Amino acid sequence: MGEDLLLQRKETLKKLVHDPAYVPMKTKEIAMLLDIPREQRMELQEVLDILVAEGAVGLSKKGKYGKPEIFSVTGLFSGHPKGFGFVTVEGMEQDVFIPAEKTKDALHGDRVQLVIEHEPAGRRAEGRILKVIEHANQQIIGLYQKSKNFGFVLPDAQKIGRDVFIPQGKDMGAVTGHKVVVHVTDFGTASHNPEGEIVEIIGHVNDPGTDILSLIRAYGLPEDFPEDVMAQAELVHEQVEPWELEGRLDLRTLPTVTIDGDDAKDLDDAVTLYKEGDRYHLGVHIADVTHYVKEGSPLDREALKRGTSVYLVDRVIPMLPHKLSNGICSLNAGEDRLALSCLMEIDQKGKVLGHQIAETVIRVDRRMSYKVVDAIITHRDPEAMAEYQELVPLFDLLKELSDRIRKGRDMRGAIDFDLPESEIILDERGEPLSIRPYDRNAATKIIEDLMLTANETVAEDFYWQQLPFLYRTHEKPDPEKVKQLSLFLQNLGHFIRTGQGEIHPKEIQKLLDAVEGTDEEPLIRRLALRSMKQAHYTTECLGHFGLSARYYCHFTSPIRRYPDLQIHRIIKEHLKAGLSEHRIAHYDALLPQVAVQTSALERRASEAERETDKLKKCAYMSRFIGHTFQGVVSGITNWGLYVELPNTVEGMVRMTELGDDYYIFDEAHYQLVGERTGKTFKLGQKVTVEVAKVDVQAKNIDFWLARHR
């Protein structure tokens, strides 16, 4: 076919399929419509194939041709540093692969319209993006690099994958090494970089605090409170006024303590406990934040907008101004404080026999730390016991009740993943001095047990009253993930009972108990956790799989979590006068959006906290290039293996660095196997590594295996 005829046929076909009156047709039907002889249909097919490849014409799964939009689907684009990406499409089991040359102008996080071009049986589909429906990156945070007449910004978010071009005169005077905020003016194409202008210079990459501030900007975390919020906070009394005690249960004579971390300033829970016969009388007293944060007020609107306090490695971004969170709402020792209390009667098996929820006034006797309480109940430290001698019986009784509650929870199958968290110590410039696993001791377990008990009790109470409420839901694992976990565990010699793709949490807990103390334990804990769904907030009581709890909510932290504050408001309104039909309708309309919004904000906070930890870990390890450490294999992929050090830092040994053999990823057994030597690397295996390279900008750490060098 001549070039002129090819162009003519292409234009004719494009015009045909884009005609509003056209309906999708197969090749034969198009040939008949255009009166193309049978002997030329092969050439027609070639032209149609070219148009499909160019994206000018779409092809359905049934072989019909039409406008690309007719056969399109929508989804969220997830980019890769190498330029390609994946689109998550609702209803499809696997993401759709998008080659780099077919991403159009999509960047990570964008909502896109795409067509699926290949969908081989049993394999991931491949597609092409038609257009971006909604851009997620109006602003990009990154590192500026200046050239003579222009510049580029290297995005902090590695998944964006493309540098942003900054024309001359649009750089605000930034120099190489500045962390900046870029407003994107042109999202570019697959072959041309996005373009933008710098709207803020955060600071130089070497300046103290610039690294964390860049992450705060990147995640859109709030910083200063608006003026109307601060004005309302200033009106709040610094002490509890006598008139505020009216109608409240006075519990100020009960021995009361808070037990928190050494650095905690927002103390929102306190406990009391005494025993009569064989019955424990536990009081969990939670700061009455809603007394000060009224529905619809500037404080309330800002708290909902933030959703949660964010605990970054060097700072806290609070949900409420400090005057409330560290002041009148914080259960500070020696001060009268308003509380919402859950008073429970508990038997010897740790079962709650009865309870009362009441508005109260309390006074904390001592502000205790986990470290000191653990020194008393675990180590019987003479100095600590002497200093707090009047409270030692209370701490012993708390430990006794905690053990009974925990035993009962274990018997029903609650899962304790107990994965190590990182404690990162910084100097005054924000530089990491040391990193170690966070100490989860007997005292932290006591508070955990008592708070969980209160959360379950409150959730069950309001479930049976059939009132609008927010629950904390952790749904059952996806059957396919349960199947994959079961098959993998069988390859390791472990067995879990599943029925039609479902599993009871007790099976997971039995597995974790069986591997405790073994080399496989960290691996199996991680794999079991990855098979779980993510907990979130719902208006329906769907239960908490991980805790093996039929009823569960978040009641105990209203200073730092909006869902807790929201249910406090409902509880108090119900206690005072009951919920009218009008108020029930109000909450029925309000709570679904609160559940969705606070779940999303919680995920944002968790991601930001993880990223700041990774940042400081990289900064810390950059001092140890060439040093060797003992570690364990914590992950295996077809591009290498991850190694975790005792201080919780994780890095990668790339496949290309395993120079003594060609290694193959055995996915079924989660191991690397040397093709020539048969040598294996398995999860949990102890190895010696050397720190090879640290990229603080990308938050990546590369190791070498010391014995392979």
Image: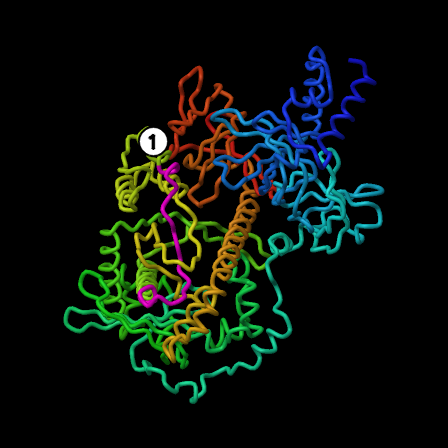
State the residue at coordinates (51%, 26%): 655
Q: In the figure, residue 191 lies in which quadrant?
A: top right
Report the front residue among 144 and 141: 141
SS state under label 1: helix
Q: In the figure, residue 106 lies in which quadrant?
A: top right
State the residue at coordinates (53%, 71%): 300
Q: Is residue 38 left or right of residue 445?
A: right
Report the front residue among 27 and 610: 27
Q: Quadrant of the N terminus?
A: top right
Q: Residue furthest bottom?
A: 242
Is 692 drawn above or below residue 50 in the view shown?
A: below
State the residue at coordinates (71%, 40%): 163
Magenta includes 472? yes
Where residue 133 appears, as percent x and y from the top left, is 66, 45
Is 112 drawn above or below residue 256 in the view shown?
A: above
Magenta stretch: give its range: 461-482
Where residue 74 appears, as percent x and y from the top left, is 59, 41
Instruction: Identify residue type, mark 1.
Output: Leu
Q: Is residue 626 left or right of residue 17?
A: left
Report the front residue among 357 and 591: 591
Neighbour tally class for label 1: few under 14, some 14-19, many 20 plus, Cα within 10 Å: some
Where residue 411 appears, as percent x and y from the top left, is 22, 51
Report the front residue among 518 and 65: 65
Magenta includes 8? no
Q: How many discs appear?
A: 1
Q: Is residue 182 left or right of residue 514?
A: right
Where residue 708 appears, as percent x and y from the top left, is 48, 25
Is 665 drawn above or below residue 204 in the view shown?
A: above
Q: In the figure, residue 115 lies in which quadrant?
A: top right
State the residue at coordinates (78%, 45%): 166
Q: Residue furthest top?
A: 39
Q: Which residue is disc 1 drawn over?
A: 487
